[in-house]
Image (cartoon, coloured by chain):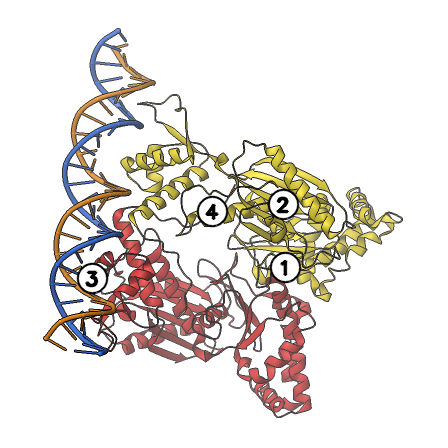
Chain colours: A yellow, B red, C orange, D blue
Amino acid sequence: MKREPVQVSGGDLQRLRQLNSLSSIRALREARGPLTLTELATQTGLSRGSMVDVVTDLQERGWIAEVEPAPGGMGRPAKRYRFRADAGHVLGIDIGVHKVLAMITDLAGQTVASGRVAVDPGTTRDERLEAVDRAVDAALVAAGPAMPDLWGVAAGSIGVVNREGVVTRVNALPDWAGVDLIGHLGQRLSCPITIENDSKLAALAEQRLGVAAGVRDLVYLHAGRRPGAALILNGRLHHGFSGATGEVGLMEITGWRTMAGHLENSTVAEGAAPEDAAGLVFGSARTGDPAALAAVDTYAHQLALGTAAMVLTLDPELVVLGGGFSRSADVLLPALRRALEPHCLRVPEIRPSTLGEECVALGAACLALDHVDERFFSPEGSIARPAAPRRLV
Amino acid sequence: MKREPVQVSGGDLQRLRQLNSLSSIRALREARGPLTLTELATQTGLSRGSMVDVVTDLQERGWIAEVEPAPGGMGRPAKRYRFRADAGHVLGIDIGVHKVLAMITDLAGQTVASGRVAVDPGTTRDERLEAVDRAVDAALVAAGPAMPDLWGVAAGSIGVVNREGVVTRVNALPDWAGVDLIGHLGQRLSCPITIENDSKLAALAEQRLGVAAGVRDLVYLHAGRRPGAALILNGRLHHGFSGATGEVGLMEITGWRTMAGHLENSTVAEGAAPEDAAGLVFGSARTGDPAALAAVDTYAHQLALGTAAMVLTLDPELVVLGGGFSRSADVLLPALRRALEPHCLRVPEIRPSTLGEECVALGAACLALDHVDERFFSPEGSIARPAAPRRLV
DNA sequence: CGATTTATTGTGGAGTCCATAGATATTCAC
DNA sequence: GTGAATATCTATGGACTCCACAATAAATCG
């Protein structure tokens, strides 16, 4: 009988020490503030004495730092330690249609530097790749020469991205399919590189840093001119067999491929450029304009069709409303909820996304951090800090 | 930043020994045949010397047994050890509309005894619960008094089952909703009890013992008069927030609630009882009857609508065609594949289920085994065999 | 029968953790 | 101020587990 591998590490005495060190790192990283030795000992289950060994070792290795003791309280004041989020950094890149955004974050996901280059739908593949390079260089320059090496890189691209990091299908950019992003980034960055679809990364960012923090099962709706979706299942990004998840909009009956027309063809938006139409309609709907409200309602009903299919399939705890139209969540979200009700057994909670236009880059950083974690906490992982130099050519 | 907990165990020296013992148990359990000490040592990464300690300990505790050395080969023949699948047993129960089946399996998922009681849709709730008791008793009697205690129990029921094991929604049996199966079984069985939806358990059985062995992402289609679906995602049964996953058939546009009519109203099945109609139609379709083929095609097209929604959402590696109609997979499966093609980016492989009518009970046993595993391999788990006596009242 | 091959058994050493006891630093009460 | 109370820090010995290496044992091959 095949079974799911329940991870069992085991090993050497040194491996045991390593596991205990990792538990301590984890405890300090997850904690709100600094922890004392006694607190650490109770959390990890180790004895105080062993905790001293572990902590001094971690301090020497640069993983944790001592903080001045807490004032007040009885007895001898205890030394306190904190996780050094600045022990390492990762790079998250959003390669979008209109911009390339490179963000360097520390191990806690805090942004320390970023670089940004504007592009547009007409930018060719090579120009776009060059824009990526410029954005990355700008972020590295902004971070300054004092920053330690990068431990990981992840980039988000539109289109379907397979497990090898190749963009296999893309509509919005004609010459983007088949681009070898790992190869391109690998020429300049000598650390592990991951590529993922941009909506998936936005979903991840919301689950880690945003409105869905800690939710284990959620559907991320990218509400925009071309709606899309991404899934977090059992707390993990669901990549799918070939990377093409959340593509329920490809079914004709959902109408997702053409539904933006309901907004753009509304009388409210007459004469406006297609990219401005939606904003106008949402704005008019906000003031109560009947035609605009009707257009929003039609859009919401269409959006609800595909959403209901996913909700009924997955029974998620939460739906996150993201994408460009989530700026108008005050209008769109109630309409979507009403439209979902007749289809669903239980309409899940719906929350508008909060991270704004940096969400894809942030999600990329989160993914890179996940991979750093996996490397560290895997049975083969070492507690030595990786030497993965960034290479500025 | 919230993160997914990467399991880190750590702990004591005895915990280290326990981890190494568990790795050894795992290695022996997963292996095809018995293993020698040297083989075990290389697989677990331990030294030979330590392996001797671990193995003698496990032998004393009854987890593993020595096998006669392999004949032939150079040098001194090595002792060989095997996992004792009979060290413990679990009970899986299928509480169906037409039958109750209780199966006792060993730790490898091999059936050692079973009991079966026929019921029908008209059976009342209390009668059905009594039938469950009789089936369980029969299985325990069949297993004989020599069998060690049960380590876990799982039962499959139709309807939506929430995390507390309560059936919250059910159509086929009018008085079944709200039944407290854990409470009922707990009166007679003093070991951990889990309740789950029957289709989900069938999916699990196929992924562990059947046609989907080892596949990590799959959609299980229950093709019958009332189609349903269950999901295995990332190697684990996807329960959902309220247990209502795979319910895409509730959307009217899929037509899943009424589609059996295409078969039952076919001229081929004129005059037959509704429960026999499908068999007749599939039989005629097999011989090439045009009316029957048309009816099957219509059914397949409807089935494909909901299936495509799930496939596009999840991008699974595999679709398993189960349920009563999977007996006619030779006719239905090609029709389903053809019907899926226009909807999907990539039509996943489709395989007919192989486990037959025992699949739900087997899946229940698999789920019980999973929970046994979780208990053993969790940081708090002990390598001592659990004393969870069955109580025959 | 001896050489070769492979497995088993035994010993010493190193690393890690725990329990315990005594030293230390701070607050609180008088 | 001084001493009691409280909590932490430091140090030591003992127990457990693993590893490396050497000596012994049991089979096959020529």
Residue occupying image coordinates x 45% and y 78%: B355
User: Amino acid type of disc 1?
Assistant: Gly
Gap in Å between the C-alphas at discs 4 and 2? 19 Å
- Front residue (pair B326, A34): A34
Gap in Å between the C-alphas at discs 3 and 1? 51 Å
User: Amino acid type of disc 4?
Assistant: Asp
Instruction: Please state which of the two labelled residues, at mark 2 or mark 3, is closer to the viewer.
Output: 2
- Whether label 4 touches label 3, CB < 8 Å: no
Q: Name the residue under label 4.
A: A373
Q: Where is residue B145 shown, x and y percent of the image?
A: 23, 74
Marks 3 & 1 on one chain: no
Q: Name the residue under label 1.
A: A246
**From the viewer's perspective, is A297 left or right of B153?**
right
Residue occupying image coordinates x 47% and y 72%: B206
- Whether label 1 touches label 2, CB < 8 Å: no
- Front residue (pair A386, B371): A386
How many discs appear?
Answer: 4
Q: Where is residue A301 shown, x and y percent of the image?
A: 73, 57
Q: Name the residue under label 2.
A: A93
Label 3 residue SS: helix
Q: Where is residue A329 shown, x and y percent of the image?
A: 70, 45
Label 1 or label 4, whichever comes before in sequence order: 1
Q: Residue furthest right?
A: A271
